[in-house]
Structure formats: structure tokens, C-alpha cells
Image (cartoon, rainbow, N blue to C red):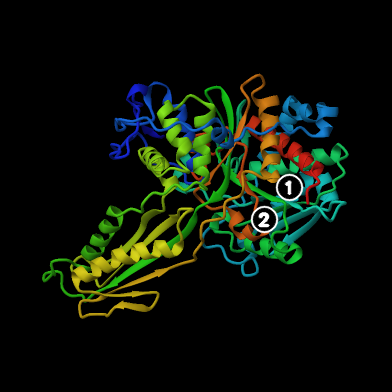
Amino acid sequence: MTSAIKLPDQDEVVFQQNNKAASKSKSTKSFLLIAGAVIGIILLAYQKLDGASLIDSFTKVSAVPEPVSEEFLDSLCPVGDFLRPKAYLEDKSLVESMVHSKEFREYTIKNLEGAIRVPTVTYDSNKQPSESHEEWAEFPKFHSFLEGAFPKVHEAFQVEKVNSYGLLLTLQGSDPNLKPMLFMAHQDVVPIDPQTLNLWDHPPFEGTHDDEYIYGRGASDCKNLIISYFQAFEKLLQDGFQNERTYIMSFGFDEEIDGLFGATALAKVLIERYGEDSFFAILDEGGASITQIDGVPFAFAPVAEKGNMAMTVELTTPGGHASLPPDHTNIGIMSKLVDLIEETPFTPILSAKNPVLNHLQCIAKYTKKFPEAYKTNIFRAGIDAVANSFVIKLLSSINLAKFAIKTTQAVDVIRGGVKANALPEYSKITINHRIALESSSSETIGKILGNVQTIAEQFGLGLYSEGKEILPKTAKGAFQLSHGRLLEPSSISPLDNDSFNILRGTLKHILGDYVYPGSKEPVVAGTLMPANTDTNKYWSLSDNIYRFTYSSIVNFQDAGIHTVNEKVVIDDVVRSTAFIYEYVRNLDEYSGR
């Protein structure tokens, strides 16, 4: 899953100013679903450190870095306080009737299996609901299922349908001065490839379970989160919850095809209704989040996500008979470009603000998974250029973790040629980019434009970018560079404010009191989401956006997300419900404006 990397002896791990590049690690596997990849990759790396793995022949050096002061160390990844609601302190059975109840576990199984059995699949070809309701026929059935399963929620919340199938549920609070809280998820799921049906151990839309897992499409992406929200609010209402703060649930219906119909319409309604920066916080789906390292429970909440853009490069050249070919055909020239693009990757960068550094620093501070010299460099990476370089090389040596700290480029589509005996006159490539937090779309475009210009000049070709002439067209042909929708990297939600303290304190409460009782004190850290969620339509509503789903499956391939045998741990859904329940109570007790 992660790179198989040998950890050097601690007495060999020292650092020098002129640190040479680490030797490349050998990947044992090269694929991980992009959503949640940073969390899963790094967690797996730490879990495998015992005996076999973090750095492969990492450079021996001659001087130990200067240790950080206790005061400085205290400022890194503060552990924070447990936050237990007053209602819990008065009556623990409110939570224990969920996490310790066989009946509640069966209730959870029934609800999630029922949700899975409604195949709310979206395809790239889906049209606006107003143009083709037939394509969305399963979504009203899903709404009916939720209404039948959670009557108190549908009685207490105002329920609105936005753009036909978007769900917007509002539980109005008694204090209009308190900013509302927004809970998000998406109703749609990815399709099943008919060629893989025989690879499913359980039919994808049957909704089945064993003692540990619930199986089916949407089990972990992300009907489990929808069910957690509904169960938490259903129980809160059953328990007599009287809310001061307003709580809103917003569920898009096309996240898997970019959310242009669902989340876009829902966000527009919320912005018009409440205005920008009007929400206390936003919680949406995230990646693998819960694990133990050296006996320390960790929860990782992504507080930022990379940007996203696709670029297209087209090349037009004269044709002719294949018996009289030039030294390099159109496709040959395009291949030269692809090779140049891949041989000139983006430079990795890790700024002090990048939550990946917080992720690393928290593990370095509270576990023994790193030698002391490594720890010191990790601690100093936000303030010292040499230490920063060391940590960049450390992450870059892990075959998949390196993608957390640089803009990625993937040539995903190539087309060209029509006949074996005809010279190709046209070829086209599409390059997908996930833009690093410290970068921008303009920097990304500039890099690819530079690559194309190099090849254009080498072969005497013209070059146009978004219709603007860069090099004049010649008799030999020309390149045309364009891009689709640009999504800049998100802002980074603060890790040092009351909003994060409430999230962290609630997670510490659930982890410490129920998931890992008697263990070392839980640690909650920020991290990075390398993929994009529906939150990218809601960024203007709050500075506090957390992409967090309670999941103890670290290896996303094991969860079957976007592939065969999708599943979720039953107890994770129960604990997710308990977390949401207590989180809402803690939010309601907070009176900050």
C-alpha cells in the first residue's frame, strides 16, 4: 500500500546543511484512491515503521540540528481539552445508549442498508434535472426512504428541495445571534462497472452485513455520513434537545460528477439567504481519519484541499501518406511533449501553514516513530530552511506521500490518428492537475506552457494559449493550449480558534471515553484533502471547514470506495453518530458570536 522503506539506525540519523537527495523508495503498490490519500498514506507509513519502514537508505549526515525549546515545542500541536457536554455529564446514558447498545447497532445497520438499496447513481452524461427527470428517478425514492426512517427530523426540520433533488433541512435555533452550523454530504454514488459485477462478494445494491461490516455501493462514500447525521438529530430530538443555534443539513445529488447541479444550487440558496462568512463551521465528508500510533489515538481532520484543473494541449500538423513520414509524426511530437512534462515535475514545497506539517508534527511530538534528529527537523520545518528541506526529502521519499506537498500532473487522456497508413494531422492530450496549497492555477498553466513552448521551438511549430498567439503558426503546424474550469487551492481553516477546539474536544471525548478507553490521551490534528469535495461550492460561507468522516479503515482500497466490495465498519457508523450527537450539543453550549 505504501512505500516499503527501511529506517536507518538512530545513530546514523543526523543532519547536515548540504544534505544530498535521498535515494528513491521502492513502492510495493502504486495506487490509492485520491480521496483521503494523504491521511491513509501517511498513517500506513507510520503503522509500518516498526522494523521495516520509513526511510530507504536516507542520507547519513554530520551534525545534529539544534533542538527546539520547550516553549516552542509546546506551541506545536497543542493536545487541547476534552469537551464533554453538560447533558453528558448529567446523564452518560444519552451516549451509552448508542455506543453500548445492540439495539442501536441493529438500528444503524437497518438504516444504512436501506439507504444503500436505493441506487442513487450519477453518470457523467446526466443532464440538468429540468431537462431529464428520468435520469434522477431514484432520488425521490431516497428522499422517501429518509422521511420514513427519520420521522422526528422531518417533523422538526424545514425540508426544502433545491433544483428538484438537493435536500436542504433547517432546524431553526432560538438565538438568531449565533451563527448556524452546516452539515454536508452527497446523496449520489458512482456507477458499477458491469464487467466487475462478478468481483463483488455481495451485490452492490443489496445492502448486506456481517458481524463487522456493512457492504454495498455508498456504504462509505458517503451514505454512512448521511445516516450518521440523521440518526444523531433523530436521537437529539427524541431526547428533548432544544437548540439555540440553527443547524442545517445540505445534501447535493451530483458530487461524483462535480456538483454543478446539486451543491452549486444549494450553495447559491445559502449564500443568498445568510450571506458570506455567515456560518460558524461546515462539516463534510473526508478521508480515513482514526487510528492508533504507539498506543496514542489519533484523529485527522482535513482543513484544506488542493486546487484542481484540467489542461488540454492540441497539435495540428500537415498530413500525408504513411509511406513518406517525417522524422517525427504529429503523435511522435506529442509524445516528446508528454515525456518532457513527466520529466519536469512540479517542485515540492511545504510551508509552515500547510496542514500536512501539522499532521507530521503531531505524530512526531506524541509518538516515538521518528528518531530524535528527524523529530527536531520536523519541529523546525516551519521556521528553518534546512530543516524544511529535510522534511520535504523525507516526504518525497515516500512514493505516495510526496503528492501531499506538490502540484501533481497526470496525462490522463491522449487521442490522435485515424488510420494506420495515414499520417496523423491532429492529436490531443488532457492533463489533470491537483494544485498544491502554496501554488496557483496561473503557476500551473505557466509550467505546462513552458513545456509546450520548448517542444514548439524544437520542432518549428506555432503556439497559442487560450487563443492568444505565443509563437506564430508555421507551415509545420501549431500547438493550442486551453484549460477547463479552474479551482484554486482552498484557504486553510484555522487550528487555533474556538471552532476547531470544539471539534477537537468532542473527538477527544468520543475517542478517549468510548473508542480507546484507558489509552493515552487522544490527539486531533489537521491535515490535507488532496481531492475536492462539494465544499468547494461553499467556501465563502465559513472560514472553518472540516472534511471529516469517522473511519477506522486506513487503507482506502480496503474500504472499496469507487471500486468493488465497498464497505464500512458498523461500529464506525455508530461512533460517527455519537460524535455528531455530542458535537451538536457542544456547539449549542458555545455562546461565542
Quadrant (top left/top right/bottom left/bottom right) for the N terminus: top left
Left or right: 447 in relation to 244: left
Residue linked to disc 1: 145
Label 2 vs label 1: CA separation?
A: 31 Å
Residue 542 is labelled as 2
- Kindly identify the residue that appears in the image at 77 percent across and 30 percent down: 95
Using the rendered image of the protein, determine whether residue 109 is visible from the camera's viewpoint.
Answer: no
Type of the residue with mark 1: Phe
Quarter holding residue 366:
top right
Q: Which mark is residue 574?
A: none
Report helix, strand or loop for mark 2. loop
Report how many numbered discs are placed on residues in the image.
Answer: 2
Q: Nearer the viewer, mark 2 or mark 1?
A: 2
Residue 470: image quadrant is bottom left
Front residue of 419/376: it is 376
As drawn, 460 above or below 543: below
Query: Which sits in the foreground, 309 or 568?
Result: 309
The answer to whether marks 2 and 1 mark residues whose Cβ atoms lie closer than 8 Å is no
What's the residue type where badge 2 is placed? Ser
Name the secondary structure under disc 1. helix
Residue 266 seen = yes
Q: From what the image shows, is residue 131 above or below residue 247?
A: below
